[in-house]
Image: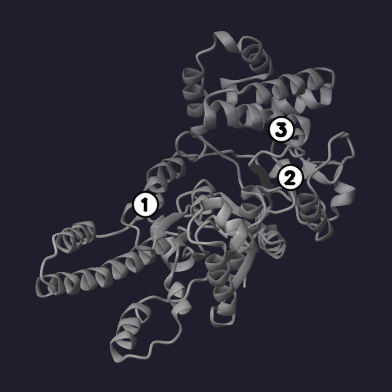
Amino acid sequence: MKTGTTNIHQNGKAAHNHTGTIQPSLVNIFALLNEQRVRYALLRGFDELSENPPIKEIDLLVHPLDLPAFEKIVRTSAFVKLPRLGYAPHHFYVNFDRASGIWLKLDVVTDLFFGKPVRHLRWPVGGDFLFRREQRKTLFTLSPADELVSLFLHNLLDKQSFRAERLTRIQSLIAEIETQPDMQHQVVQLLQSALGDALDWEQLRLFIGEIAEKNIRSEAKRIGAALNRHKPLGNFFRKITTPLLKKLRTLAFATRHRGAWVALLAPDGGGKSTLSQSLLKQPFLRSKIVYMGINVDASTVGLPTTKLLKNIIKNMTSAKRPKLLILPVKALASVNKLLEHWLRVGAGFVYSLNGRTVIFDRFIYDSYLAGAPKRLKSKLRRLLFWGTCPHADLTIFLDAPGELLFRRKGEHSPEALERQRQKYLGIANQIPNFHAVDATQSPEDVQLAVLELIWQTYQKQRNG
């Protein structure tokens, strides 16, 4: 890859203005990259940086020699690196931004590749892009000529579609370049060096002007074939091996990116179920819920015998069967309960090894409320349950007064719920990584607070 001058402030051209406001956390990242003279450029979407969708993806090109410095900066800025096995040359970094309540994802490449479904076609002159980059306010972007070519090929070869915002940007770049002979010459050179006679400036203009009448898939096949003439064996190797490597992602999670265990505690009415369901929708948590309570209908992982034994005991009791007949069934139910507990813990291990965040609705910590067992039978029972269940990586107590809990569900009494609340707060020092979250807030604010705690847990696990 060709390198530009190491002084990025001299290398970049102040060529554009942007009226929007880029997110403060991103401004800080770009400021650090500039300060450390990391050679990078935003590939596309500059005008979208000031928007706040639930997931904001920022596509960056970084010089391969500067990738270690780039990674150090983003990790110290609270970003967590995701597994990339099967997604080369991409490097993914994710952070949850509490201030705006959105996810930030940095999609970083050190070379440009195109293709669908596998990006296997290597762009032969990508290094020049960083040499010609331009400064736009707080960050560096591609030059108009480079952005036009890369954005066109990204939509044609990667997406095989042109969404309205990207088509408008391409049309804007064409209009700008038409008035600049030097830029037009750059586009001609780029297309000629990479695609030969398959696409020139006039053909590109006509294609965009008549895009509604074009067969995009057919055109993508033709342009892809022209790009493939550069190192076809390497392109073929990537096309074959990349899908195979994706199948090994589970191994990557198991060895280096284990999912966190998150235990949710609260009296009835605390909002555990509402919070659990909202966390399921968070894409980068990849959550799974494991219900650890006794409500059979709420169970997410359990044995089919649990409900059967419960109904048998209920029917035998209603029919006033002799206790000698009921006791063996109750003993069997106790064994079933222990086996179900082990099954749930095992499911938590499996989900975690697959890189999923495991949300435990209730946890073994609930048994702390009963105090220390005194009878040998109770001590043995606690040992069998506790000894097979590790501590959670994060324990969240949804804290709200008993009066509010009673108004929400109308179960028990305000006094009983308040006593239970105080017991939870009383065992906080016995539980590692215990955090009380104000559950009197709106569900949205509770979710934001919990997401921040979960992502801080991942930052500690993976960034140190």
Q: What scheme was used to colour the molecule?
A: one colour
Q: Position of residue 346 (x, y in %)?
A: 33, 67
Residue 464: which quarter of the image? bottom right
Give above or below for 86 relative to 75.
above
Residue 98: which quarter of the image? bottom right
Task: State the CA–CA distance, disc 2 to disc 1.
Answer: 31 Å
State the SS at label 2. strand
The amino acid pointed to by label 2 is: Ala
Between discs 1 and 3, the one toward the N terminus: 3
**Label 2 CA crowd tier, 10 Å (few <14, some 14–19, many 20+):** many
The amino acid pointed to by label 1 is: Lys
Q: Residue at x 55, y 76 (%)?
A: 423
Q: Which mark is residue 41?
A: 2
Judge from the rendering whether residue 270 lies leftward or rightward of residue 320; answer left or right: right
Q: Is residue 110 visible?
A: no
Task: State the CA–CA distance, disc 1 to disc 3.
Answer: 33 Å
State the SS at label 3. helix
Judge from the rendering whether residue 180 lies leftward or rightward of residue 437; answer left or right: right
Residue 426 versus residue 15: which sits nearer the camera?
426
Between discs 2 and 1, the one toward the N terminus: 2
Give above or below for 248 relative to 226.
below
Residue 20 versus residue 369: which sits nearer the camera?
369
| Residue that mark 3 sits on | 147
Task: State the CA–CA distance, disc 3 to disc 2.
Answer: 10 Å
